[in-house]
């Protein structure tokens, strides 16, 4: 089981949520590109898993609007700017706090490449490469073209189309190996939910303000080994993705 795209979904796939003006129009264009996926988007399957946009539409300033915070680090070389967003796993149960930044799932980093002020590619965290089979990752990305958007609730919901060649997501044991223990787990309406909380690491030269808290969640039917839903939240925007389920 390899590859998952937790925070990239939040940055790129929550199209049309709480955006206005020109940003909104550019997000609409991006969603249309996902509908024409093969001609508009390239999936780089070698580590790190990445998306390349053949006709970039999002501006560098749009990332500030979508993510709601400055990147952890920025490197500029001529017309190319690379932004790195590093998220630190927080809120672990007492006695299970991470002792160092090398522990499994302790950090997730997202890298955005800007060329001439436009977002040309986004590379997912290294842990992503270990989480989902690439076929499932790509199917999830393609499903965003038909996501149902609720601008009031600030949510978008999509479902991976049922295909024989799309494998199941990782099971509980694999998720813990990749991301560590969840920050917390709960049971509601007959389903179990694992929630991972993250804090964006601010730039070293920036005064610490209110931290940006992001989250991802895996939802299981009781006693099921594999999650049937994956959700991610950043800057108050939620994306929920229905996952393939094992045959009864």
Image (cartoon, rainbow, N blue to C red):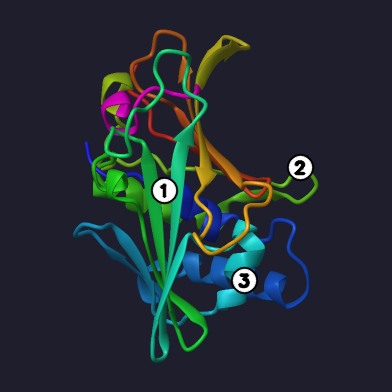
| Residue at image coords 41%, 23% | 97
Identify the residue at the far left of this view: 46
Residue labelled with disc 2? 153
Q: Position of residue 185 (x, y in %)?
A: 51, 16
Alpha-carbon span between mark 3 and mark 2: 21 Å
User: Which quadrant does the C terminus fall into?
Assistant: top left
| Residue at image coords 29%, 30% | 170
At mark 2, the secondary structure is loop
Q: Nearer the viewer, residue 147 or 26?
A: 26
Dot placed on the residue nearer the N-terminal end, 2 or 1: 1
> Which mark is on residue 62?
3
Callout 1 crowding tier (Cα within 10 Å): few <14, some 14–19, many ≥20: many
Residue labelled with disc 1? 140
At mark 1, the secondary structure is helix
| Residue at image coords 34%, 48% | 137
Stretch of the chain drawn in magenta = 175-183
Residue 247 included in the magenta stretch of the image: no
**Left or right: 130 in relation to 91:** left
**Left or right: 208 in relation to 231:** right
Callout 3 crowding tier (Cα within 10 Å): few <14, some 14–19, many ≥20: many
Q: Position of residue 226 (x, y in %)?
A: 35, 22
**Left or right: 237 in relation to 245:** right
User: Which quadrant does the N terminus fall into?
Assistant: top left
Front label number (2 vs 1)? 2
Alpha-carbon span between mark 3 and mark 1: 23 Å
At mark 3, the secondary structure is helix
């Amino acid at each position: 089981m390899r590859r998952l795209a937790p925070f990239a979904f939040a940055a790129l796939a929550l199209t049309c949520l709480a955006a206005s003006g020109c940003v909104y129009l550019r997000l609409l264009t991006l969603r249309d590109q996902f509908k024409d996926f093969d001609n508009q988007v390239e999936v780089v399957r070698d580590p790190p898993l990445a998306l390349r946009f053949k006709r970039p539409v999002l501006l560098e300033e749009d990332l500030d609007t979508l993510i709601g915070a400055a990147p952890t680090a920025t490197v500029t070389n001529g017309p190319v700017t690379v932004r790195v967003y590093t998220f630190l796993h927080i809120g672990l149960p007492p006695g299970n706090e991470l002792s160092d930044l090398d522990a499994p799932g302790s950090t997730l980093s997202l890298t955005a490449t800007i060329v001439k002020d436009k977002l040309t590619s986004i590379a997912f965290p290294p842990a992503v490469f270990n989480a989902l089979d690439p076929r499932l990752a790509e199917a999830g990305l393609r499903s965003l073209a038909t996501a149902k958007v609720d601008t009031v609730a600030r949510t978008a919901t999509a479902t991976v189309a049922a295909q024989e060649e799309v494998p199941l997501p990782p099971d509980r044991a694999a998720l813990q190996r990749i991301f560590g223990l969840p920050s917390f787990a709960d049971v509601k309406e007959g389903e179990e939910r694992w929630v991972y909380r993250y804090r964006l690491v601010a730039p070293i030269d920036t005064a610490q303000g209110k931290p940006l808290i992001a989250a991802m969640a895996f939802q299981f039917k009781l006693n099921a080994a594999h999650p049937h839903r994956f959700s991610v939240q950043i800057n108050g925007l939620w994306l929920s993705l229905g996952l393939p389920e094992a045959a009864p």
